[in-house]
DNA sequence: TTAAAACATGTCAGTAACTGTCATGTTTTA
DNA sequence: TAAAACATGACAGTTACTGACATGTTTTAA
């Protein structure tokens, strides 16, 4: 039982040092050099990817794909891994070629039969579905690397007003609703802007680094829970159908007030920046809702409705 | 090196049998009963959760949480696991209490320092974001169990037309856009219908099983790639902005035809069932698009626009 | 009550495996 | 050419493992 532990520790040692001689190992573990060779051969046989360089200045080396010491999982833990892999299944692009397959195979192989069946069924009763967009995002890996290195990127981006080229410092990337997004600091505007990675048509890494950067999670928190800078109060009456619709909107749902089971209203404060989005949303709900405040939004929706009526009415001529 | 393999095999044996005597083991592996006891004590020390029952009819037992034999991962594989866990982070409800924490701890502990740093950073540059809905779904576990067991469920469901109680046979569950959905066969309508699990207000498992059932993945494939039963041809002109919008719609994007870089049109065939949805979608895009065919859709949009204009115009009085 | 079937543990001699020491090669570099 | 590495083999001493036997305890069925 002792040799096992020694080999275990040796694997850790090997992965940490990456470059060492049999002498080092002998000294570190208090064994003879001969035995050090023997042990190193052992962990080599076990699959730790070491190789040797003979001659002066030589020694043992570890390949890039370092190996972790053997780990024991219980069934529930293995299941957690399968479960998590399920969540990646429906992504078309991922930032890395990730080695799901080999992990799956290793764990699956050592499951008892009944558990294998359970895992097989997992596939047939559970999915984390995402829109399988046909757009793919070829730059994910580069963006992540740049984000890790706090490096500036030159990108060409397709926006409403046409293509623009700019230098930005990516905060990170996140997947949402089938798309990958990149919040990135744009020094030109001196603020963090959001880019959709599939709208990036060209990208080049610069060597320039960018010091001040925040973690993605912080940004996401702030982005989702941000308080309005220029608050606008809105008040919207909801019919039963309007209620049903608005309840599906995470940003609205907390602000719904029920008058009776058939009716309700929304009263909340939004930011000036979101004005267009909110207005378009209530426009789209048609007569299932009625915006009361702000007056400007009512006017805008009416105007849009009239334009649209005209847009299609003109066909009649 | 041989004893290690034997212990390894013994763990597998133990997990498969779950109930056996030292004698069985001695016979199976060609060792003495005394040694069988010794080995079993060894794997017990290693963490395999076995216990014994003395006396006639006794023997070794394995606890529910069976242990897998030690597995060796390389760094990339460990990284794949961390990566996958990242994808689960933003889900509010999951069907199980899954043991992410312990897996994370075990793998993280045996990483080399530089790799630890890389994993730490993973969190700060990558997210799989989902709307954190405030609605939670308490029935996920039960649904999954029922789906696995091909069991009928009694549910009370909130739909457009009010609450209904019905018996359905769940195909499975899937997460999409922050909600959990349950496709389930409804014998009353003799077809598979889609339910949103947060709209299920009450649920009870029946003992009745339901034989014919398809795998969730098949259903998803069919659901997403279904061919129109009652095809309707649509033709829509797109302005530049309309193009940009429609490109973000996975169901439209493949059918966009470019006339020149500023203009394009959509020509495709949709199913009668999707008529309302499609019509509403183009309505919402306003003057950025112009539906040409079918005429009925043009009429409907015009009518809606007029109604909406009126809906808000009536305020003026 | 008793016998049988299990685990639990200890002892001990024989065997297998491991270890360290030497010895001899080979490869590379200063 | 010498030094510093790995590579491998042989061998004796040591350690650890193994199996046989013995004894004890717990449980159940006859």
Image (cartoon, coloured by chain):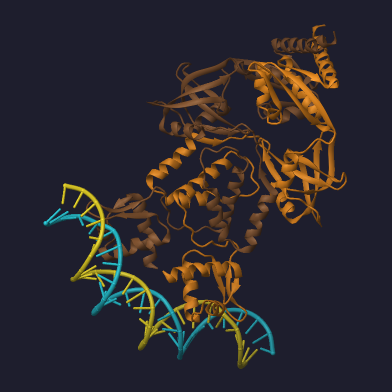
Chain colours: A brown, B orange, C yellow, D cyan
- A79 relative position to B283: left or right: left
Who's the residue at 53% across and 57% down the image?
A106
Asked if A146 appears above or below C14 in the picture, the reply is above
Residue reaching furthest right? Answer: B188
* Count of numbered tags: 0
Query: In front here: C7 or B232?
Result: B232
Q: Which residue extends farthest top?
A: B317
Q: How far across and how far down the image is residue B142, in percent?
A: 72, 50
Instruction: Give left or right: position of B181 versus B233.
Output: left
One can see residue B139 in this view: no
Residue occupying the point 74% across, 45% down: B219
| B147 or A298, nearer to the observer | B147
Residue B49 shown left or right of residue B312 in the figure? left
Quadrant position of residue B271: top right
Position of B6 relative to A207 (above/below) = below
Residue B21 picture quarter: bottom right
Q: In the rendered image, is residue B298 in sight?
A: yes
- Residue A180 location (% of width, % of height): 57, 32
Question: Against A260, is A228 above or below?
Answer: above
Query: Where does residue B207 sit, x and y in percent of width and height?
Result: 80, 57
Image quadrant occupied by the N terminus of chain B: bottom left
The residue located at (49%, 63%) in the rendering is B47
Residue B202, given in percent of the width and then of the height, sits at 78, 44
The answer to whether residue C25 is left or right of residue A252 is: left
Q: Which quadrant holds the C terminus of chain B?
A: top right
Viewer-closest of B53 and A260: B53
């Amino acid at each position: 039982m002792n040799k096992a532990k020694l080999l275990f520790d040796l694997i850790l040692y090997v992965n940490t040092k990456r470059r060492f001689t049999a002498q080092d190992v002998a000294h570190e573990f208090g064994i003879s050099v001969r035995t050090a060779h023997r042990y190193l051969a052992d962990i080599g046989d076990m699959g730790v990817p070491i190789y040797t360089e003979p001659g002066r200045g030589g020694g043992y080396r570890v390949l890039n794909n370092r190996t972790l010491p053997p780990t024991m999982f219980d069934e529930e833990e293995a299941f957690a891994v399968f479960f998590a892999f399920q969540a990646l299944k429906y992504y078309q692009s991922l930032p890395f070629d990730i080695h799901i397959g080999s992990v799956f195979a290793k764990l699956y192989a050592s499951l008892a039969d009944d558990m294998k069946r359970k895992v097989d069924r997992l596939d047939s009763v559970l999915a984390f579905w995402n829109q399988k967009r046909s757009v793919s995002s070829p730059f994910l890996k580069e963006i992540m690397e740049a984000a890790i290195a706090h490096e500036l990127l030159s990108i060409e981006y397709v926006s409403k007003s046409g293509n623009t080229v700019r230098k930005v410092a990516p905060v990170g990337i996140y997947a949402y609703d089938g798309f990958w997004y990149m919040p990135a600091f744009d020094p030109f505007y001196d603020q963090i802007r959001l880019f959709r990675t599939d709208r990036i048509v060209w990208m080049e890494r610069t060597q320039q680094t960018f010091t001040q950067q925040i973690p993605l999670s912080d940004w996401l928190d702030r982005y989702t829970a941000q308080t309005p800078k220029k608050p606008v109060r809105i008040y919207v009456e909801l019919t039963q159908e309007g209620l049903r619709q608005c309840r599906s909107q995470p940003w609205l749902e907390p602000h719904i007030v029920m008058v009776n089971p058939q009716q309700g209203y929304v009263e909340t404060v939004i930011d000036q920046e979101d004005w267009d989005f909110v207005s378009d949303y209530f426009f789209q709900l048609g007569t299932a809702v009625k915006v009361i405040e702000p007056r400007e939004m009512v006017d805008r929706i009416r105007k849009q409705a009239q334009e649209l009526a005209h847009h299609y009415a003109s066909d009649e001529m």
